[in-house]
């Protein structure tokens, strides 16, 4: 018996688009586009725009990986495709 997983893949793609959009906004928006406005704020002696360009985007990306893992585990159970 073959399952119709088209809804599963639609939800998966939607989740990926949302998470990658967040990463793009953080990395390009905070690191490049809004850097002048963010540089008026200092964290640990460094401008916030510089921090996002150097480390913040990486931290957000790693957090998004963990969020994707957690959400996909939940979705896999919902569609009964978990291991």
Image (spheres, rainbow, N blue to C red):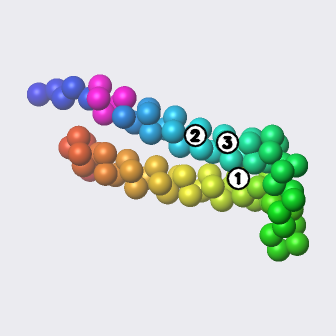
Disc 3 or disc 1, which is closer to the eye?
A: 3
Report which residue position mark 3 lands on.
25
**Residue 22: percent from left, percent from top:** 59, 44
Numbered disc total? 3
Report which residue position mark 2 lands on.
20
Q: Secondary structure at mark 2?
A: helix
Query: Is residue 81 placed above or below 56 in the rendered structure?
Result: above
Q: CA distance from mark 1 to mark 2?
A: 12 Å
Residue at figure coordinates x 59%, y 38% from the top left: 21
Q: CA distance from mark 2 to mark 3?
A: 9 Å
**Which residue is situated farthest in the left direction here?**
1
Q: Quadrant of residue 59?
A: bottom right
For marks 1 and 2, the one nearer the N-term is: 2
Q: Quadrant of residue 58?
A: bottom right
- Numbered badge on residue 57: 1
For marks 3 and 1, the one nearer the N-term is: 3
Image quadrant holding the N terminus, namely top left
Residue at figure coordinates x 29%, y 45% from the top left: 76
Question: Mainly helix, strand or loop, the magenta region?
Answer: helix
How many residues crowd around disc 2 within 10 Å: few (fewer than 14), some, or many (20 or more)?
some
Q: Secondary structure at mark 3?
A: helix
Does the residue at mark 2 contact the one at mark 3 (Cβ under 8 Å)? no
Compared across the picture, whether 47 is left or right of 62 comes to: right
Residue at figure coordinates x 84%, y 67% from the top left: 42
For marks 2 and 3, the one nearer the N-term is: 2
**Viewer-proximal residue among 18 and 73:** 18
Please give the range of residues in magenta.
Answer: 6-10
Compared across the picture, whether 9 is left or right of 81 comes to: right
Q: CA distance from mark 3 to mark 1?
A: 9 Å
Residue at figure coordinates x 72%, y 58% from the top left: 56
Disc 2 or disc 3, which is closer to the eye?
A: 3
Q: Secondary structure at mark 1?
A: helix
């Amino acid at each position: 018996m073959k399952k119709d997983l088209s809804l599963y893949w639609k939800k998966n793609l939607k989740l990926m688009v949302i998470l990658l959009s967040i990463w793009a906004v953080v990395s390009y928006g905070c690191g490049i586009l809004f850097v002048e406005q963010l540089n008026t704020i200092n964290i640990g002696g460094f401008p916030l725009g510089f921090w996002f360009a150097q480390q913040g985007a990486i931290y957000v990306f790693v957090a998004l990986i963990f969020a994707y893992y957690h959400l996909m585990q939940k979705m896999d159970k919902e569609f009964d495709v978990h291991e």
